[in-house]
Image: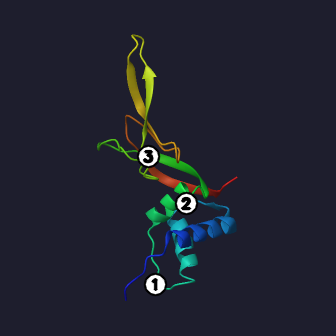
Amino acid sequence: MAYKIPSKEEIVNAIASCMSDYGVINSQHKLGDLVRKKIQEKEQLYHVSDERIRRLAVNHRLVDLELKYKEARGGRLPHKCPICGSKLNRLKNMTIDGGTVTLGYSCQTCKYWTGLNKNVPARYVFSSRR
């Protein structure tokens, strides 16, 4: 039995409905389960990943996002935001002699940030937009 992929609009509507029903959802997995259950009411064979749901919720500004981080050992710093896929901006500071130094990177869309030691999202808390 093959599964079907729901449209962006169907997912966005399901996210909005879940957020109005629950207000606060304290994990990406739980949000994914609730949204899948909502869209499967229309079509039983629909499937969508937690990551796609998260990115649509953030990029369509359907949720306020609170992030809990953990520091990753090794690995390269990301060039794109690991949460929403947007380009990261450098956080710079001026030195005493007039040069600049990079302190880290941040995302304007979802407020992800990392210092020179890579921060990895460990927990997402989604709440209804205020």
For disc 1, the marked residue is: 45
For the residues marked 3 and 2, what is the alpha-carbon distance in whole angstroms?
A: 22 Å
Disc 2 to disc 1: CB gap under 8 Å? no
Report helix, strand or loop for mark 3. Answer: strand
Residue 110 percent coordinates (x, y): 53, 48
For the residues marked 1 and 3, what is the alpha-carbon distance in whole angstroms?
A: 35 Å
Side of 98 where 31 appears, left or right: right
Which residue is depicted at the point 52% across and 72% down?
A: 33
Side of 124 where 49 appears, left or right: left
Report helix, strand or loop for mark 1. Answer: loop
Disc 3 to disc 2: CB gap under 8 Å? no
Side of 42 where 17 appears, left or right: right
Q: Which of disc 2 and disc 3 is earlier in sequence?
A: 2
Q: Nearer the viewer, mark 1 or mark 3?
A: 1
Report helix, strand or loop for mark 2. Answer: helix
- Amino acid type at image mark 1: Leu
- Amino acid type at image mark 2: Ala
Q: Which of disc 1 and disc 2 is earlier in sequence?
A: 1
- Name the outermost residue toward the top: 97
Q: In the picture, which quadrant includes the N terminus?
A: bottom left
Residue 8 percent coordinates (x, y): 50, 68
Q: Residue 70 got which mark?
A: 3
Location of residue 128 by image quarter = bottom right
Label 1: few (<14), some (14–19) or many (≥20) C-alpha neighbours in 10 Å = some
Label 2: few (<14), some (14–19) or many (≥20) C-alpha neighbours in 10 Å = many
Location of residue 74 by image quarter = top left
For disc 2, the marked residue is: 57
